[in-house]
Amino acid sequence: MSDLLVIVFTMVLFLLALVVVPNFLVHRAAKKVVRIFRKYDALGPNRAKDIETLGLKPPTFAQRMMRLRDYKPRALDVLINAGVVQRTEDGRLYLSEARLNDTRLGQNLKG
């Protein structure tokens, strides 16, 4: 019975490592991405910046092999899908503070 308990406990830890930890890291990176947009004053369509200027361009395969994982590009994708970060017609990006305030992330950044 104790062997079964150890196996179940190990599986739960494995699931935590696969699901919960990456989600936490993406959420933490999303806060950093929001700070980057605010730092570069990319807060509207007329002040939008390109991804290279913001420093959010995904690393190449070779770059990924040489350093720790950067969750900011994934967090940027999540924010784009949520409508918090929006694209202009020419592909530049900006932060929509109104949409951010409607999200749980926006509430966390306030308080």
Image (cartoon, rainbow, N blue to C red):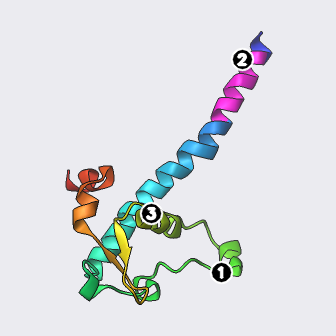
Q: CA distance from mark 1 to mark 2?
A: 42 Å
Mark 1 Cα-neighbour bin, 10 Å: few <14, some 14–19, many ≥20: few
Q: Is residue 13 left or right of residue 93?
A: right
Q: Is residue 17 left or right of residue 106?
A: right
Residue segment shown in magenta: 4-13
Q: Is residue 77 above or below residue 39?
A: above
Q: CA distance from mark 1 to mark 3?
A: 22 Å
The amino acid on which the numbered mark 1 sits, given as a three-letter code, is Thr
Disc 2, SS: helix
Give yes or no for residue 5 being in the magenta stretch. Answer: yes
Where's residue 73, x and y in %? 51, 70
Q: Which residue is mark 3?
A: 81
Q: CA distance from mark 3 to mark 2?
A: 40 Å
Q: Specify the principal SS of the magenta part.
A: helix
Q: Which residue is mark 2?
A: 5
Among numbered discs 1 and 3, the one appearing first in the sequence: 1
Among numbered discs 3 and 2, the one appearing first in the sequence: 2
